[in-house]
Amino acid sequence: MTRAELSRLVTGDREADGVVPATGFTALMVGFSSAAMAFLAVAAICLGLAAARLADRWSTEFAHAATVRISGPSAELDARVTAALELLEATPGIVSARALTEGEQRALLTPWLGEGIPFDALPVPRLIEIIESSAGPDRDSLRQHLAGEVPGAIYDDHTRWRRPLLRAAGGMQMLAVVAVTLVVLLMAVMVMLAARSSLAANQSVILTLRLIGAGDAFIMRAFVRRFTLRALAGALTGTVLALIVLFALPGAGREDAFITGLTPTGWGWLMLPMVPFTAAFAAFWSTRWATRYALRQVL
C-alpha cells in the first residue's frame, strides 16, 4: 500500500464512494462477520496470554519446590521425620526443610476426602516441604541417603506433575495462535465473498462507469475503501464486546481465578488494539484482490 493509497483510504473520495451502496445485505454481512471474528480473536488472544501467565506461574512455583513423603508405623513417624529433617538441613542445595503440621495436612486432604473422614485412623504419611536453591541438590544422591537413613522416605521434585502442566499450557498457547490465524483468514474470505457479491449485484453500474470513462482504479478504490472501513467498524465493535464480556466474568482480575484470569495484563493489552487494524488490513487486501479479479471478468 502506497502513501497515496493510504491517504485516499483515510480521507475518501466522494465520487468513488457513491459507487458502492452504503447499506444492504453485503454491508451487514461484512460488519457482522468482522465483529464476530474480532470477538473470537480477542477471546483466543486472551486465552493464549492467560496460558502463558499460567505456565510462568507454574514454572516459578514448582521450580525450586520439592517434597519428602515419609510412611511407616505411627509410633516411628516422628523419629523418621526428625531424621529426615536433619539429613535435609545438611544437604547442599537445600535452602529450607519444614515438616507440615497435622492441621496443614488435614487441610490438604479435606477437599479430596471430605470433612467427616477420621484422619487419625488413616495411615496418612508425613510430608516435609523443601525449598531448593537455584542449583538444587544432587537428587540421585539425596534419594539414596534418604532410602538408607530414613525408611519409608520418598523424595519428589514434582517433575512428573510440572512437565505435563507446562506442556498443556504450551499447547493452549499454540491453540490460541492457530485460532487467531484461522479467524483472520476466515474473515478475509468472508469480506472477499461479500465484495464479489456486491460487484456482481452492481455489474450494470460498473459497465456504465466504464462506458463513461471511469477506470478500474477508480472503481477498485471505491469498493476497497468501503469494505475496509466496514470491516474496521465491525472489528472495533467485536473487540469492545469481547472486552465487556471478559470484564464481566467472575474473578476476571484475580490472580487465583481460572488460569489467572482471562483479562490481559501489562504488554498484553497492546495486542488487543491490533485486532481491528489486522481485520482492516485483511479486508483491504482481500477486497483489493477480489475487485481486481472481478473487474477482469467484466467485459
Image (spheres, grey):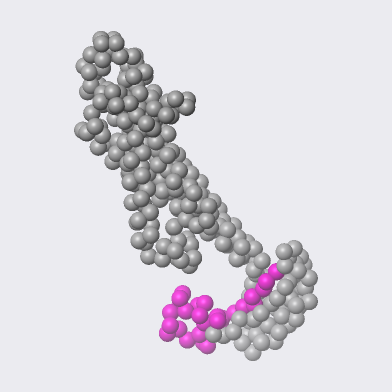
Q: Quadrant of residue 10?
A: top left
Q: Position of residue 285 (x, y in %)?
A: 41, 28
Q: Nearer the viewer, residue 63 or 268?
A: 268
Query: What residue is shown at x 22% (from left), y 33% (from top)?
Result: 23
Q: Is residue 89 above or below residue 235?
A: below
Give yes or no for residue 119 being in the magenta stretch. Answer: yes
Residue 216 screen position, x and y as percent: 34, 16
Report if residue 273 lies within the magenta region. no
Whether residue 198 is visible: no
Number of numbered discs on residues: 0
Q: Is residue 181 left or right of residue 136?
A: left
Front in this rendered view, residue 83 or 29: 29
Q: Nearer the viewer, residue 118 or 29?
A: 29
Boundaries of the magenta span: 104-132
Residue 97 can be seen in this image = yes
State the image quarter where residue 141 is shown.
bottom right
Residue visible at 28% across and 41% down in the picture? 32
Residue 238 screen position, x and y as percent: 34, 46
Q: Is residue 53 left or right of residue 151?
A: left
Residue at image position (29%, 26%) is: 14
Please determine whether, in this image, residue 289 is positioned above or below residue 273: above
Residue at 36%, 42% (x, y): give it: 235
Percent across and percent down for residue 58 are: 57, 62
